[in-house]
Image (cartoon, helix red, strand yellow):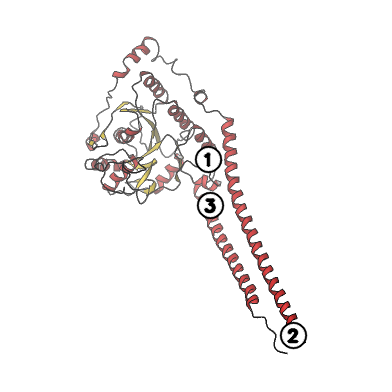
């Protein structure tokens, strides 16, 4: 009787243990299913964001054609109608174009503050380039912000981007309380036809500054610093914005931020706070490499990224003085950081400056907070970003940005609490199940 009772009890304990194992297996299976569902949810959300962007973008682009012909289809035909550029005058203009390199700028007492500095190292020979063609600005105007847009010659894409910029972020920028100006900086071409076309464009738009320097990427630093010198001597703006022609700038928002937030001596943008390591030619990744005799340090000081940054005109003389003791190397944004560091000017982060070419912004909050965006934008990108930003242009920047930050904070805290609760539930269930299973199953002696 006693043996039979023990057998029944052992069988009961064994059955109970199997049920506990089965319960644990089912519980872990449920957890696995939940994790798969969560992973699927986040993956689908990411795919939806990407597909929505792609569909909107392609729909927008397919609704417009931005090839070389259509981008200038609506441009007025001023060339054939201009009384200055036809017949014998046009022929004489072409024949003598290459000889018209000198630019007679009016003398300015401020020029003694910005001498024509020359610099030489094994990698680069630097000298300032004088303008050969400049816009006609009113000297009596007090300009708050002058935008220097780096452009080029020789490729149709340069002119297409200039036209796209004029029709997007340079359009309707007149503000009641501040005066804004812009110029496109170009180098020189040895092709008379290209220079003729450039002069025609300059005649119509009055926003072209051509420098007496060969137009190529290696001479970008000559173009930038010669542009700074011309801006300081001829325009005298309070601030200078340097921008590439493949970015998008919301000038009203930038002007508002500069008016409210900046000090007298200012240099700012998308700041690399720790600088960056200096690349050498012997390195595997040697893009923008710098020779040791041009810059001996192993890291650059903090500087603002090259696609767009702002300086105040008040720091230009001190930057140029620092050029006398710092050899010029052809990495324009890093070199400006070297000069700013030598002049005791620290770069300031401007909120809303996004240096990347990924346009998959997740919501309107981030779109509304953008002040400058881009790098490697083509004509279609510029029109798409312009259309996207017009959807949020009625929204005030600060409330939307603060709401977005509040929403992100609440979401983050909620997710942390949810994960902690989930982990706590798993831990409690694990302890409860195994505490019963590990309890010794025995029967008191009868």
Q: Quadrant of the C terminus?
A: bottom right
Residue drawn at the location 55% of the way across and 58% of the way down: 410
Please state the horizontal and vertical placement of residue 276, each as a whole percent of the image: 35, 48
* Residue 182 vs residue 140, the one in the foreground: 182
Q: Is residue 408 left or right of residue 249?
A: right
Mark 3–mark 2 Cα distance, whole angstroms, equals 73 Å
Please state the horizontal and vertical placement of residue 367, each as a whole percent of the image: 52, 44
| Residue underneath mark 2 | 3
Q: Which residue is at the far bottom? A: 446
| Residue underneath mark 1 | 389
Q: Is residue 341 left or right of residue 86?
A: left
- Give neighbour class at mark 2: few <14, some 14-19, many 20+ (Cα, 10 Å): few
Mark 1–mark 2 Cα distance, whole angstroms, equals 84 Å
| Residue underneath mark 3 | 404
Residue drawn at the location 38% of the way across and 48% of the way down: 271
* Residue 231 vs residue 26, the one in the foreground: 26
């Amino acid at each position: 009787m006693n043996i039979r009772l023990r057998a029944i009890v052992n069988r009961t304990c064994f059955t109970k243990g199997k049920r506990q194992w089965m319960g644990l297996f089912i519980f872990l299976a449920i957890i696995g299913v939940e994790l798969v569902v969560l992973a699927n949810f986040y993956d689908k959300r990411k795919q939806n964001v990407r597909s929505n962007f792609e569909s909107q973008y392609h729909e927008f682009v397919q609704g417009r054609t931005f090839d070389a012909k259509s981008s200038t289809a609506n441009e007025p035909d001023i060339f054939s109608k201009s009384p200055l550029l036809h017949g014998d005058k046009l022929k004489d203009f072409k024949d003598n174009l290459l000889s018209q390199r000198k630019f007679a700028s009016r003398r300015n007492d401020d020029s003694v503050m910005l001498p024509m500095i020359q610099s030489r190292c094994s990698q680069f020979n630097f000298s300032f380039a004088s303008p050969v063609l400049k816009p006609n600005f009113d000297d009596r105007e007090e300009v708050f912000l002058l935008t220097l847009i780096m452009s080029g010659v020789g490729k149709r894409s340069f002119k297409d981007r200039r036209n796209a910029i004029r029709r997007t972020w340079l359009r309707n920028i007149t503000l009641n309380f501040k005066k804004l100006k812009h110029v496109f900086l170009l180098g020189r071409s040895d092709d008379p036809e290209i220079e003729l076309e450039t002069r025609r464009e300059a005649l119509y738009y009055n926003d072209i500054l051509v420098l007496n320097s060969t137009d190529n990427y290696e001479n970008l630093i000559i173009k930038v610093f010669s542009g700074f010198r011309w801006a300081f001597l001829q325009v005298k703006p309070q601030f200078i914005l340097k921008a590439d022609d493949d970015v998008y700038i919301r000038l009203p928002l930038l002007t508002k931020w500069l008016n409210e937030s900046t000090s007298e001596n200012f240099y700012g943008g998308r700041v690399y706070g720790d600088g960056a390591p200096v690349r050498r030619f012997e390195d595997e990744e040697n893009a923008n490499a710098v020779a040791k005799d041009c810059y001996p340090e192993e890291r650059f000081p903090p500087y603002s990224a090259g696609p767009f940054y702002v300086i105040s005109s008040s720091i230009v003389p001190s930057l140029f003085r620092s050029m006398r003791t710092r050899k010029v190397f052809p990495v324009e944004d890093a070199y400006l950081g070297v000069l700013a560091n030598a002049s005791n000017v620290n770069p300031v982060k401007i909120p809303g400056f996004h240096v990347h070419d990924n346009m998959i912004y997740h919501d309107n909050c981030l779109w509304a907070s953008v002040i400058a965006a881009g790098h490697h934008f083509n004509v279609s990108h510029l029109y798409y970003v312009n259309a996207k930003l017009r959807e949020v242009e009625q929204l005030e920047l600060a409330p939307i940005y603060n709401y977005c930050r509040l929403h992100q904070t609440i979401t983050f805290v909620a997710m942390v609490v949810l994960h902690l609760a989930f982990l706590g539930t798993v831990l409690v269930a694990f302890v409860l199940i195994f505490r019963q299973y590990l309890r010794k199953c025995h029967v008191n002696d009868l």
